[in-house]
Amino acid sequence: MVLLAILSIFMLGIIFPAYADQKQQQLQEVNRQIQQQKANLNSTKKKETDIMSQLNNIEKSMSQTQNEIDATNDRIAYLEHNIQTTQKNIDKQQKDLDEQTETLGDRLVEIYETGDTSYLEVLLSAEDLKDFITRYDMLGSIVEQDVDLIKTINKQKKELALKKSELEVKQRELVSVRESQESQKATLAAQKGEKQEVLGSVQKEKSQYAKALAALEQSSREIEAMIRREQGGGGGPALGSGTYTWPAPGYSTITSSYGMRYHPILKVRKLHSGMDIGAPSGANIVAADAGKVIYSGWMTGYGNTVVIDHGAGKSTLYGHQSRILVSNGQTVSKGQIIGKVGSTGWSTGAHLHFEVRVNGSPVNPAGYL
């Protein structure tokens, strides 16, 4: 019995270290895989940072292209109005010319029909000197009127030809500008496609590595526990009225409210610090209350952004704009147009991201509108 007990102890002394060594090797392998997954994750995070930088560059290019399109639209509107005005002037001048030409034609017919009566005969048929002088002045006036009429017609013809030439130049420019607009729209469409492609791939690899790492770390904790068991072991005066007007006039649909949500781009649950108001690109954005613009420009994630200080610790933010119409330090009135709706920054479609902040911290805008 003693021999059997000694033999059993001896066998346990051999088996348990072997078992422990096996588990230790498993742990080392898991740790190696964890380190590899961490390296992969860090690499993916760097890649994601690079992609986000690329995305920001795309967004800036899109914003610039949109500004070019807006400027082209303004130029087209100007040209169309100018062409319309010029055409009206041409039509009026053509009508005047036609009337003058008709008058000259009538005068020539009259001269032709009275061709047998010379100016000399008219003068010689005068009854006295006074009648002679009267007839002379009258004939001189008629001749002068005929000459003036011919000069007027020739001048109108030249002016009309010049206006028609100017009109043709403007019409050619309008065609060229419209072609440029189509090219700009194609560029913007390509940039939007590139943006969507980047957004579609930015999270996939990171998510896979993160899941694998979590599983391996769980396995590591379980193996460690098993081995230990086996071995026995928080400003200023108010600037506005304090009551806010709706920042997107004519568009009342809230596509995403304030609060925790699953971010459509970052693919994680996080606080949505404002409300999203659905509106088409180019729709007006107005100041919710009077105040001073303390930020106007590009902001990572928000794209083209305006922040207005209303005093008393309150401020409002307007993100994802296609065009900004105010500048830093500018005083704005309640309801003043400050920009245009867009989809710049980390956005998947045209809308206004509107925030209300108290002492810098976001609060639910619904309580202020």
Image: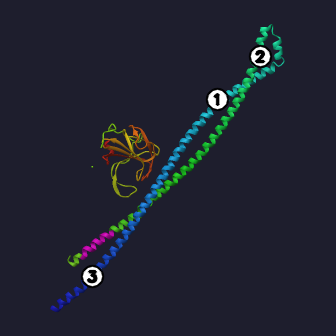
Q: For numbered disc 3, what is the local secondary structure?
A: helix
Q: Nearer the viewer, residue 264 or 167?
A: 167
Q: Residue at x 55, y 50 (%)?
A: 184
| Residue found 81% across the figure and 20% down from its top | 113
Q: Which colour assignment does the render follow?
A: rainbow
Residue found at x 50% / y 49%: 64
Q: Amino acid at mark 3?
A: Tyr
Quarter holding the N terminus? Answer: bottom left
Q: Is residue 179 visible?
A: yes
Q: Hey, which quadrant is residue 18 in on the image?
A: bottom left
Q: What residue sits right under mark 1 in the picture?
A: 92
Of pointers 3 and 1, the one earlier in the residue sequence: 3
Q: Say which of marks 2 and 3 sits in front.
A: 2
Residue denoted by label 3: 19
- Dominant SS type (magenta): helix
SS for dot 2? helix
| Residue 70 percent across, percent down from the top left | 51, 44
Residue 369 seen by the camera: no
Q: Which residues are magenta?
A: 215-227
Identify which amino acid the numbered label 1 is placed on.
Lys
Which amino acid, by three-letter code, is at mark 2? Leu
Residue 340 point in image, percent of width and height? 45, 44
Secondary structure category for the residue under label 1:
helix
